Image (tube, rainbow, N blue to C red):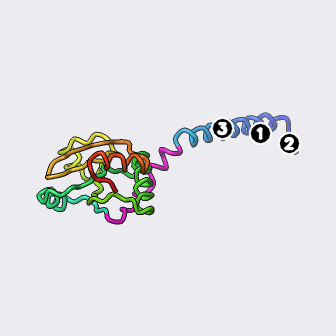
């Protein structure tokens, strides 16, 4: 049986629990996506793409062949959307008809610094051993195709 002393304590506990539940919900709504983006694994490398390595990049640059580079981070929402768009292009047979490399924004710091990348979700075209075009925020298949077509690399 509850006494008069325990009723205010139970009532106070219920109020605190209700407020913490509400605050917790607000926290999840505000920061849930941020938490998810920081904890999720990297997207798998797309078919036909390569992970960046200095010797391989230097070899391709010395050959002078066209090269598409994506500056990527697993926590980047733009990168996630770009990956989905590139995956869609590949699944539909409209993937970039160009050699492509993915650079990890945090792991490949020498490359990022050398080419002055300040943002993830950036795509760069190299041709004849030099950078010829750069764009960020290409989050749809159409935008990626348009970027490549403007540089003469229609799929």
Estimate the spatial distance between the alpha carbons at disc 1 and disc 3, rounded to whole Å: 18 Å
Residue assigned mark 3: 22
Outermost residue toward the left in this view: 62
Where residue 138 sits: x, y (%)?
38, 45
Of helix, strand and loop, which one carries label 1?
helix
Residue assigned mark 1: 10
The answer to whether mark 1 and mark 2 are in CB contact below 8 A is: yes
Q: Nearer the viewer, mark 1 or mark 3?
A: 3
Of helix, strand and loop, which one carries label 3?
helix
**129 or 36: nearer the viewer:** 129
Quarter the C terminus occupies: bottom left
Estimate the spatial distance between the alpha carbons at disc 1 and disc 2, rounded to whole Å: 10 Å
Disc 3 crowd rating (10 Å Cα; few below 14, some 14-19, many 20+) is: few
Q: Is residue 78 above or below residue 23?
A: below
The answer to whether mark 1 and mark 3 are in CB contact below 8 A is: no
Q: Which residues are magenta?
A: 32-48
Residue assigned mark 2: 2
Of helix, strand and loop, which one carries label 2?
loop
Q: Residue at x 42, y 51 (%)?
A: 141
Label disc, if present, on residue 152 of the rendered structure: none
Where residue 97 sits: x, y (%)?
30, 59
Estimate the spatial distance between the alpha carbons at disc 3 and disc 2, rounded to whole Å: 28 Å
Which circle's residue, 1 or 2, is located before the other in the chain?
2
């Amino acid at each position: 049986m509850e006494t008069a002393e325990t009723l205010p304590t139970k009532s106070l506990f219920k109020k605190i629990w209700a407020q913490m539940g509400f605050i917790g919900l607000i926290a999840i709504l505000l920061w849930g996506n941020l938490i998810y983006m920081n904890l999720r694994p990297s997207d798998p490398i797309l078919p036909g793409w390569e992970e960046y390595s200095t010797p391989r990049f230097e070899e391709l640059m010395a050959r002078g062949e066209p090269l598409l580079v994506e500056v990527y981070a697993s926590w980047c929402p733009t990168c996630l959307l770009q990956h989905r768009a590139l995956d869609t292009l590949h699944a539909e047979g409209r993937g970039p008809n160009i050699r492509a490399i993915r650079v990890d924004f945090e792991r490949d710091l020498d490359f990022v610094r050398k080419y002055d990348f300040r943002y993830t979700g950036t795509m760069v075209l190299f041709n004849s051993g030099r950078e010829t075009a750069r764009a960020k925020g290409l989050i749809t298949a159409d935008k990626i195709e348009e970027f490549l077509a403007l540089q003469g690399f229609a799929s």
